[in-house]
Amino acid sequence: MSRSAHPAGPRHADVMPEGHYAAPPADLNALDEKVWARTVSRDTDGVVQVGGIPVTRLAEEFGTPAYFVDETDFRARCRAWADAFGKDADVFYAGKAFLSRAVVRWLKEEGLNLDVCSGGELTTALDAGMPAERIAFHGNNKSAEEIERAVRTGVGRIVLDSFQEIVRVAHIAQSLGKRQKVQIRVTVGVEAHTHEFIATAHEDQKFGIALAGGEAAEAVRRALKLDGLELIGIHSHIGSQIFDTSGFEVAAHRVVGLLKEVRDEHGVELPEIDLGGGLGIAYTSDDDPREPHEIAKALNEIVTRECEAAGLRTPRISVEPGRAIVGPTAFTLYEVGTVKPLAGLRTYVSVDGGMSDNIRTALYDAEYSVALVSRTSDAEPMLSRVVGKHCESGDIVVKDAFLPADIAPGDLIAVPATGAYCRSMASNYNHVLRPPVVAVRDGEARVIVRRETEEDLLRLDVG
Ligand code: LLP
């Protein structure tokens, strides 16, 4: 029903939450392990801790808002992905989800590769010692300077995204006297949305080269002719926050179809396929993500089966999970500043951050969970909305939440599963300072990205 159907203003039914928060959870103090990082638990005194450190101590030492990353969990997830895919496949962590030099070192130590999509991410990766051959360089509009830097430093692969780029990379590689390993990113006509996928006949987005109409086959034809390029495979990324492996299966089927066409036309068997990232995580208790070993099994089976049917050698598979590795490992800690009950509607709980540290709610209508973490409470559940401190009514962190009715200024609340696309998409809107990222492990906490300061703002503003 449209808003104008209620000239008297919103009624209670209009503001009732849907989905996860349609009813209060049985126990507001419980922490669902699906959405919280692995070492998070509640102390005997009711305070939430991570890596053995209570959030009250973390808030005192590092301030709020702040992101806390459970390093033990991050490393365990890297290993789970690497083990699930085994030595005959490659796992590239998608740095766009969250990248810092510490993260690069963890990836390196845990044996993962890295997908970067800008010169800035490339610099971070190289500066922290990621070997260039373990880096894949992505992007639909890489600059000539970025391409040159990638080729010069010897990145393992550049993923080509357009006809112009095929020529551009070949030209740059040749002028540097190099032959650059490349993949071609194709759009397979599978568009993935959160809980479903829709097979689309036509592509209407900026990435990749369409399989439909023979465009991708033409791209392969051109790439194979160019001396500066060594075409090692085909890349496909179907979308984000996907829970169902069937979209990947359709993509794999279509990519193998192209490999077969290439073999038939050129007598060349391309040795690799990359099936991208996009695996979903639990933001609320309603979400049921697949485990890495289930995904690996499904992808290996489909690729092997399809290749056998086509008489092709099974190519080496790679994947690029970002969110599924870092997303669940972090939470954002906020201090409550004001509590504003709106009679018959809900209570607005304002925190000291907001859309500048988590734009995903405003941008994608994303759902999050939230909990009071500095103490437990036996008070009644209260329908709440967690909002930030920005000058914008869309500045919502958690749209529908039940918090205990005695929530008060000074309480600490935390939003779990903010490891991916929160710090990396953070802004300075309203000149609010971007929060630090603190890594916690075995009773020790250290800043890996420091809090922005007002001097940082003034340094960029040259007056
Ligand atoms: N590989 C490629 C080529 C990608 O474009 C992406 C994400 C990934 C891998 C990693 O996807 P993941 O496993 O993290 O879902 N800002 C949005 C997500 C945009 C993702 C763009 N590409 C969000 O906050 O949900």
Image: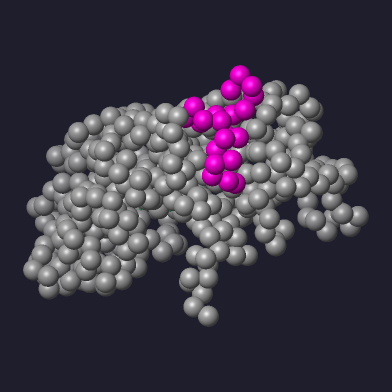
Image position of 180 with respect to 130: above or below: below
Please name the residue shown 22% across and 72% down the image. Answer: 168
Q: Does residue 416 appear left or right of residue 180 in this picture?
A: right
Q: Does residue 156 appear left or right of residue 203 in this picture?
A: left
Nearer to the camera, 190 or 39: 39
Q: Does residue 202 appear left or right of residue 166 in this picture?
A: right
Please tell me in which quadrant of the rendered image residue 299 appears: top left
Please name the residue shown 49% across and 27% down the image. Answer: 52
Please name the residue shown 61% across and 38% down the image. Answer: 414
The image position of residue 242, as x and y in percent, is 46, 41
Magenta span of residues = 43-64
Image position of 163 with respect to 373: above or below: below
Colour setting: one colour
> Is 57 a magenta residue?
yes
Please tell me in which quadrant of the rendered image residue 433 appears: bottom right
For this orientation, the residue located farthest to the front is: 61
For this orientation, the residue located farthest to the top is: 44
The image position of residue 320, as x and y in percent, is 33, 45
For this orientation, the residue located farthest to the bottom is: 463
The image position of residue 93, as x and y in percent, is 33, 45
> Is 245 a magenta residue?
no
Residue 414 visible to the viewer: yes
